[in-house]
Image (tube, rainbow, N blue to C red):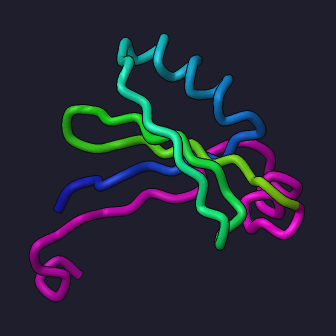
Amino acid sequence: MKIDHIAIAVNDVEESAKTYQQALGVDNVEFETVESEGVKIAIIHLENCRIELMQPTNDASPIKKFLDKKGQGLHHMALETENIEGEV
């Protein structure tokens, strides 16, 4: 089992991406927008996993609701495994 990605809810994905790039010493960031989820994502690729910074793009976004309730921070961590039954 390994960490696939760590998702962090943020207010400003571009500013947050700059902060993470500087802190982690990386420059490979991809941006994408998922209209169906109302979210803009910055994907930072690390050696063995990735960090996804998520910013809401509208008031109906689940990320907007998360930020309103809890503020910026860890939203979820996704694990990857070859054998889910054996790992659980």
Q: Is residue 34 above or below residue 32?
A: below
Along the line of sight, which residue is nearer the eye, 72 or 43? 43
Q: Position of residue 16 (x, y in %)?
A: 63, 27
Picture quadrant of residue 35: bottom right
Horizontal and vertical percent position of residue 73: 66, 43
Residue 88, image x and y in percent? 23, 82
Q: Which residue occupies 51% across, 50% down?
A: 7
For the N terminus, which image quadrant? bottom left
Residue 77 on the magenta span: yes
Q: Is residue 83 above or below residue 68?
A: below
Q: Is residue 63 left or right of residue 87?
A: right
The span picked out in magenta is 59-88
Q: 61 or 35, which lies in front?
A: 35
Residue 60 at x, y percent in the picture: 85, 69
Q: Is residue 68 above or below residue 88?
A: above
Q: Residue at x 80, y 52 (%)?
A: 67
Tell whether position 83 is magenta: yes
